[in-house]
Structures are given as C-alpha cells and as structure tokens.
Image (cartoon, grey):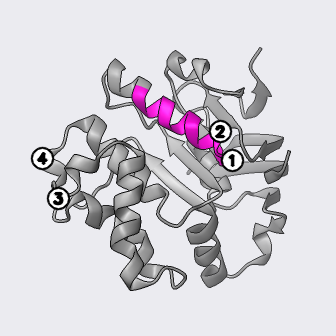
C-alpha cells in the first residue's frame, strides 16, 4: 500500500499568556492511499490540529511531516501553496461556498490557479465532478437554492477539482441530517475505493461503518481505536 502521509515524532505546542499547552505528543502515524481514516476525540482534543498539520495549514513544533515523501518543512511558502493545491482537497463542516457563484462555478474555483487544467476544460470538468456526486440537475443553482446536503456535495466536488491524492474532511456531516450524513460518507468511501486517501474528523459514530482505520486522539496521543 502506498503511503502518502507520514508523521514522525510530531509534537505541537501552543503558548498562552500563563502556560504552554501540548496539543500533540510525539505522534507517529502513516496514512495510505486507498483507505478511509476516521479521526475521533472530544472537542478540544486536537483533531483539527492534526489535520491542519497534515494539510500544511499549520507547522508542528517538532517532528517531521512527509507528504508523498516530501518533507514539508523543506518547502518555501510558494512551493507549499502549490503542493497543497496539487495534493490536498479540503472539505469543511460549513461548506464555504461562494454565495454569488453557481454550483459549477464554485467547483471551477480551484481550477483557476491550476495551470495544468486548460480554461476550455474547466466547465466540462466541473460538470463531471457534479455528476460524480449526483448533482447533474443542480449545476446552475446558487448555494441558497440548495439543501445542506447538496451544498456539501458541491463542496466535495470542489475538493476534487484538482484531482488531489488526499481529501481532508473536518466534520463534513456536522450540519446534516442522518440521510445526508449517510450519503456523504458513502461518497467519501467510494473515493477511498478509487484510490484516494480520505481523512475524516468526526464526532459521529456513523463514520465507524465506513472507516478502514479509526484513530482516537486523547491527551495529545493518537492511538488506533480498538
């Protein structure tokens, strides 16, 4: 199995006015292509910190983060942005769709900074991705005209725009009902079956039905949940 992410002895500390808080303690973990990973833990346990470190949105206090065998500490800011664009897709609980853009335009947004996708190809690629999440009949709709589940599916399509190897989803079903939650997890599971590395932060036990590996983060320590 191809390892696309590896954390070696990663720690992350935050300083407050009166003390230093150790959020991650000597984390050693790898994530492989073609697997669905669930990351669980109580609020404030550091789950989002882990995904931010993996997604190059934050840097560890110590330790090494390898993505596609690249030591992320060795790249400059421009290289980091390019690498994030090409390898990582993000899905968030609050969708973060542009209210002034139609569904297909929201999906096209990440392509605008990708020189490998021709301008003439963007529209058709957006339609293909919306079809993948079963939104063929919603391509011209604005976010306010879509249900929460539909908006999240647009966000998934947008995360796939540049065909990343890694999808990081931070509480992607937190604002959805049970039916849409199940649908979103099924889509993410299919993406893992198609070879992508899927990392989902979730409080929902529903994710356990889909995950190949479940990690629990507690007291800064990441362990496989038994």
In the image, which residues are magenta? 183-197
Label 3 SS:
loop
Residue tagged by mark 2? 193
**Res 119 → quadrant:** bottom left
Q: Give the CA separation, mark 4 to mark 2.
A: 31 Å
Using residue 155 as the reference point, say whether residue 210 is left or right of it: right
The prevailing secondary structure element of the residues shown in magenta is helix
Which numbered disc flags the more N-terminal residue, 3 or 4?
3
Judge the density around disc 1: few (<14), some (14-19), many (≥20) Cα neighbours within 10 Å: some
- Give the number of marks: 4
Q: Residue furthest left?
A: 145
Residue tagged by mark 1? 195
Which numbered disc flags the more N-terminal residue, 3 or 2?
3
**Res 128 → quadrant:** bottom left
Image spot of residue 78 (x, y percent): 61, 83
Residue tagged by mark 3? 140
Residue tagged by mark 4? 145
Question: If the image is split into quadrants, where does the N terminus sit?
Answer: top right
């Amino acid at each position: 199995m191809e390892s696309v992410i590896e954390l070696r002895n990663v720690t992350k500390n935050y300083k407050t006015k009166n003390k230093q808080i150790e959020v991650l303690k000597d984390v050693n973990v790898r994530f492989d292509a073609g697997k669905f990973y669930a990351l669980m833990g109580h609020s404030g346990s550091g789950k989002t910190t882990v995904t931010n470190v993996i997604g190059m949105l934050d840097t560890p206090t110590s330790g090494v983060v390898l993505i596609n065998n690249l030591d992320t500490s060795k790249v400059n800011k421009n290289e980091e942005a390019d690498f994030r664009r090409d390898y990582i897709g993000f899905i968030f609980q609050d969708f973060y769709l542009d209210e002034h853009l139609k569904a297909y335009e929201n999906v096209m947004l990440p392509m605008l900074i990708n020189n490998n996708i021709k301008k003439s190809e963007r529209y058709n690629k957006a339609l293909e991705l919306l079809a993948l999440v079963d939104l063929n009949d919603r391509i011209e709709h604005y976010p306010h005209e879509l249900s929460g589940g539909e908006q999240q599916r647009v966000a998934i399509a947008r995360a796939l725009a540049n065909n990343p190897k890694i999808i990081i989803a931070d509480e992607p079903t937190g604002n959805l009902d049970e039916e849409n939650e199940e649908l979103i997890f099924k889509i993410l599971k299919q993406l893992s079956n198609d070879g992508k590395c899927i990392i989902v932060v979730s409080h929902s036990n529903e994710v356990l039905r889909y995950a190949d590996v479940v990690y629990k983060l507690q007291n800064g320590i990441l362990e496989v949940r038994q």
